[in-house]
Amino acid sequence: MASHIVGYPRVGPKRELKFALESFWDGKSSAEELQKVAAGLRVSIWKQMADAGIKYIPSNTFSYYDQVLDTTAMLGAVPSRYGWGGGEIGFDIYFSMARGNASVPAMEMTKWFDTNYMVFVDPATTLCLNWDQMSNFLMHLTRQCKNIRRLKLPSPHRPSFLLVVIKLAKGVEKSFSLLSLIDKILPVYKQLGLAGFSLMSLHLSWILILKLHAFTHAYKELESSVSGLNVLIETYFADLPAEAYNIVTSLKGVTAVGFDLVRASKTLGLIKNGFPSGKYLFAGVVDGRNIWANDLDASLSNLRALEGVTSLVSTSCSLLHTAVDLVNETKLDKELKSWLAFAAQKLLEVDALAKALAGLKDEAFFSANAAAQASRKSSPRVTDEAVQKATTAVKGSDHRRATNVSTRLEAQQKKLNLPMLPTTTIGSFPQTLGLRKVRREYKASKISEEEYGKAIKEEIEVVVKLQEELGIDVLVHGEPERNDMVEYFGEQLSGFAFTVNGWVQSYGSRCVKPPIIYGDVSRPKAMTVFWSTLAQSMTNSPMKGMLTGPVTILNWSFVRNDQPRFETCYQIALAIKDEVEDLEKAGINVIQIDEAALREGLPLRKSEQAFYLDWAVHSFRITNCDAQDTTQIHTHMCYSNFNDIIHSIIDMDADVITIENSRSDEKLLSIFHEGVKYGAGIGPGVYDIHSPRIPSTEEIAERINKMLGVLDSKILWVNPDCGLKTRKYSEVKPALSNMVAAAKLARMQL
Ligand code: GLN
Ligand code: ZN
């Protein structure tokens, strides 16, 4: 019985890679220094795994930026704008692809399946095998192997590669047939096999496997030309359809298959029904997507039930998606910590399970784990009877507002008296260094509550005054008191915990620190009423209350795994509902409930999407179902791909939706061209806030006019794409001024 890890976080327990990268980019350190940090991280991870008893240690899971980008480089699929003339790809070109440079933009990114991790995709117009990059890479790999030997690590070295890249590469499907592409890529993989690695793993997702003919072809080719190579196929994040399962497990050239037994609930059944003898099952029972300690007894009995199958204990997927090491959490209490396992702790769990299966059960480790599981189940910190009761009751109703959207819009217009094509912004205003400092010092108790309150109030005054001067119709307070749109609410809700170092890489040097939802969620007291009413008192224009929606809070947190996600979402929804009601009572007539990440929770499998959308949209409706007709509920969504979920968006039944759109007008507008009926207010962003570029009045006016071609002038709003917090005032002022001018211009032409 052996143990295995699919992959490990590369950013380091204290984000060492992030700081090394940023210092290199700023010209403060050399390439050698960056390489040294990277090598140090790799070695310490291997050592840690070896110390934990892991038998199959992965290599090539490190990347300076992103693993798909590395594969792109290896395959020579470098877009021509980077001026690569062949040969080894150095930091210069590599980081230009990742981040762009003064003259060319970065490659396009997309999400790594349904994780928050981002990978690069760009139309792959050429695909030439980059032998220089390859041999350089092989040299590195060989050197790494030697390092492993020098460290006297007992473990075989398992390099890991991505196969899925060909499916992700944008434009590929249109311009190439998948088969011809695979034929181009195969020589690279063959070369890797010939380099003499005893076991190599290929990561691919079930999505690729859907193209079964191409998949089978690839493996037949691979096995016919590389003898002595043991291929492990890693599949994760979802069940494999039965047909794909049969093919994958029966391929001659495949020695082992790894399954995600946490998320793929049906796969265990398939394995029990038949797994070929002579092959190895890498049983992914330790969750790589979460921070919860594994229920070791439950995993052990699942593993024991796989009698007759030669299995190894593994993680469900790469540990890249979880936090790095619980050891660095100084602020979490002991009890809560006993419920958690970050990547470093998951190594120990995998090893303990492997040993237990081999008859070497570490009784002390297992009983400590059982005690923690029991304490989590019975803890009064986790269960709040009243919340549980309220959540159960939620399921009995649909939570729709009393009247339909057009009646409500009329009632609101009477109260708000807005011009046609009203202007607004999405919520945040620039977060200056001074502002960040004030918040930091307040958190560290370096300044008093009074001083902090004064600074925030002054900032709100500036923001309100600026909006009045610009002539914006519906104002915001600018969110100066918020460091993060989820953390701000999580910190004020019960059932949430926060880590100090629980960072998860999202791409390159960017990391996020998701809150941990460990218990039933409730709202002890109002969270935003103070600042919103203060801001409203500074102006006669309507001031938008600004809340983060339940689905976004859920999707950007580590969510408890002891109840279905929708239950937790309903609980958050009820807490936000309390806040909506308090804002309304305090005289706030427009309330925006951001659902920036609604789309992010969409399950990979089509068959599961309707259920998710149903409870996600229901959760949103819960937050504002009891709002008066005259209270205008806004929502905001990031990401531009709405076409396939437009009916769910309509079903949210918000009065106004503002959406990130400025990079894909055509796509959004096509929905309405196709005749989708949309009666609520809608503000497709008229300029891109991700860029420092200042849009001209003419171009904004032109976009407004284009939208008026398909949308009724009565429902169109004019606003930027998203919040302005990452921008500078020197960009925001002229951009908003042009936006207001464009709206006025368009109004005159109505
Ligand atoms: N209200 C938030 C802001 O303006 C919304 C951010 C988001 O959509 N990501 O910052
Ligand atoms: Zn947004």
Image: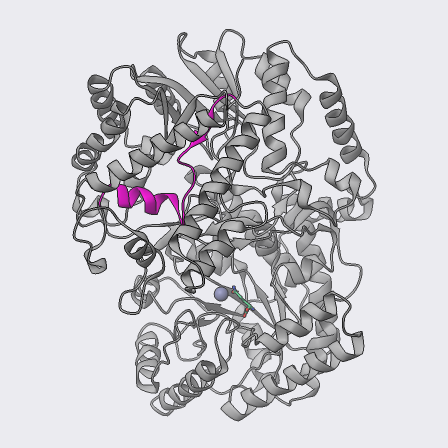
Q: Residue 61 versus residue 708: which sits nearer the camera? A: 61
Quadrant of the frame with the C terminus: bottom left
Q: Which residues are magenta?
A: 55-76
**Residue 92, image x, y percentages:** 30, 57
Up-down relation of residue 144 to residue 664 (above or below) = above
Up-down relation of residue 482 to residue 214 (above or below) = below
**Residue 430, image x, y percentages:** 54, 76
Please report the residue visible at 24 percent of the width from the left and 52 percent of the height from the top.
Answer: 123
Up-down relation of residue 177 to residue 633 (above or below) = above
Could you say which quadrant of the image residue 628 lies in? bottom right
Please report the residue visible at 60 percent of the width from the left and 13 percent of the height from the top.
Answer: 357
Residue 72 sits inside the magenta stretch: yes
Indicate left or right for 337 with 715 as reference: right
Q: How many marks?
A: 0
**Residue 469, image x, y percentages:** 53, 93
Please report the residue visible at 20 percent of the width from the left and 23 percent of the height from the top.
Answer: 221
Could you say which quadrant of the image residue 455 lies in? bottom right
User: Can the viewer see residue 629 in this picture?
Assistant: no
**Residue 522, image x, y percentages:** 75, 54
Residue 675 sits inside the magenta stretch: no
Q: Residue 1 versus residue 134: which sits nearer the camera? A: 134
Indicate left or right for 384 with 603 as reference: right
Could you say which quadrant of the image residue 415 lies in? bottom right
Up-down relation of residue 407 to residue 332 (above or below) = below
Q: Residue 740 versus residue 622: which sits nearer the camera? A: 740
Indicate left or right for 77 with 413 as reference: left
Q: Residue 402 versus residue 308: which sits nearer the camera? A: 308
Quadrant of the frame with the N terminus: top right
Please report the residue visible at 50 percent of the width from the left and 24 percent of the height from the top.
Answer: 153
